[in-house]
Image (tube, helix red, strand yellow):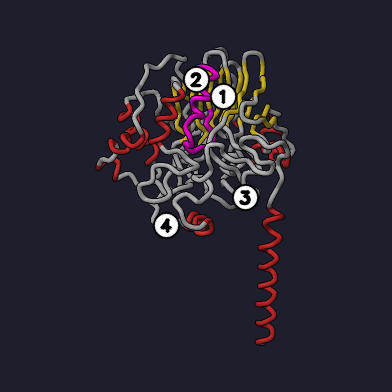
Amino acid sequence: MLKFVGLSLLALFVAAALLVTIAPRFLDRIYYRGPATDHFDGERFFNPDGDQDTAHPPGGGSRGRFFWNNLTGRDGRPDWPASVAVTPASPEARVEGERMVATWIGHATVLVQTNGLNILTDPVWSRNAGPFWLGPKRVAAPGVRFEDLPPIDLVLLSHNHYDHMDLKTLKRLWDRDKPTIVTSLGNDSVIGQVGARATALDWGGRVSVRPGVEVIVNRNHHWGSRWFTDRNRALWSSFVVRLPGGNLFFAGDTGMGDGRWPVEAASHGPIRLALIPIGAFRFQPGQMASGSHIGPVDAVEVFRRLGATTAIPIHWGTFRLSYEAYDTPPRLLAEAMRETGQTGFAPVGIGRPFTVPPLAPRPPVPAVPRAELLRRLDTDAVRTML
């Protein structure tokens, strides 16, 4: 019996040793090959404004402990609702002319319809944001049933994290509509695993969709991975879609970084609608941003620097990725907008088509330094937001 136990332990030890040495190489992937640049070292991409804030788990501690806490929820985080009532929309087949309608599907997925084009951002219809059956589960059903989704012409795919790149959904879209998929370098390799084709461009790259409509791949501040060891093998990005009647900006998933990327996006022309993330920013009590995710405090400054007429907050209220309460992002956004004297950036309901106002210049609003905004937000009302 003791000999059997000893052999079993030895076998487990050997298996663990093999797993540690073989699995990382097996799970690593080469998604892109090309010359070194100011954000690619020949093997992996990086943020030219620094990776110190994205290199470690948000909130500190070990990466293993972070993922264990995230899976188990044993970190003092407030409860989220098990489900949120959603009445799915049935969008129009096409929205012609310069009229623009945006329908928030959930998380970073938005259907934008204008000029006869149906544009979809980071489409995710799966129940879980993770590999296999793992990962956070949706608390809100998609705001449009896939069966009711009109034919999609253009997909903007920001990076390869599971809550933004859902291969099952991409395959369904490709098999049904064969849309133009625009992404950043290396992600086309991952998308190709399900038979779909994507145009992958570096920051600053452009692709014409039709006369008068162009997609520009824009810098933001994030990172990428599907299996941990393939970290930053593919690039992350935001997008500007140049359109008659005013541009569309999709921030993707991003931290603030040097904060110059919104100005770079605005240099391509006036922005009519901006899709800006506000959630998954808190990983310890009182935290207002993580390196990879802006919260409302930074989102209002992104909105100001973009000069957009209208913005819709995304990346909240669908998948529980962090420690803030379910409704903290929109409540904090309202406080930050009030304190900065801005209008035009407010939540819309999941599955509620929103008619975007026409492009109009916004009156200049002076910047509120971040430290000053945090001081103004140090109120009883804000302190009660978990």
Return the disc, 4 or 1, that comes first in the chain's sequence.
4
Assess whether residue 255 is covered by the magenta stretch: yes
Label 4 – label 2 distance at C-alpha:
40 Å
The structure residue drawn at horizontal position 60% and vertical position 17%, both measured from the top left corner, is 116
Vertical order, 297 against 136 (above or below): above
Q: Amino acid at mark 4?
A: Asp
Return the disc, 4 or 2, that comes first in the chain's sequence.
4
Vertical order, 15 against 35 (above or below): below
Residue 383: x %, y % from top left: 29, 44
Q: Are marks 2 and 1 in contact (CB under 8 Å)?
A: yes
Q: How many marks?
A: 4
The residue where tag 1 is placed is 240
Q: Tell me where residue 1 sits by quadrant.
A: bottom right
Query: Which contiguous range is marked in magenta?
Result: 250-270
- Mark 3 secondary-structure assignment: loop
- Mark 2 secondary-structure assignment: strand
Label 3 – label 2 distance at C-alpha:
35 Å
The structure residue drawn at horizontal position 50% and vertical position 17%, both measured from the top left corner, is 270
Return the disc, 2 or 1, that comes first in the chain's sequence.
1
Nearer to me, 84 or 101 = 101
Residue 310: x %, y % from top left: 44, 22
Label 4 – label 3 distance at C-alpha:
23 Å
- Label annotation for residue 131: 3
- Label annotation for residue 271: 2
- Label annotation for residue 75: 4
Label 2 – label 1 distance at C-alpha:
9 Å
Q: Amino acid at mark 2?
A: Ile
Q: Tell me where residue 22 sits by quadrant.
A: bottom right
Label 4 – label 1 distance at C-alpha:
38 Å
Would residue 142 be seen by someone viewing this image from the given angle?
Answer: no
Name the main secondary structure of what is drawn in magenta: loop
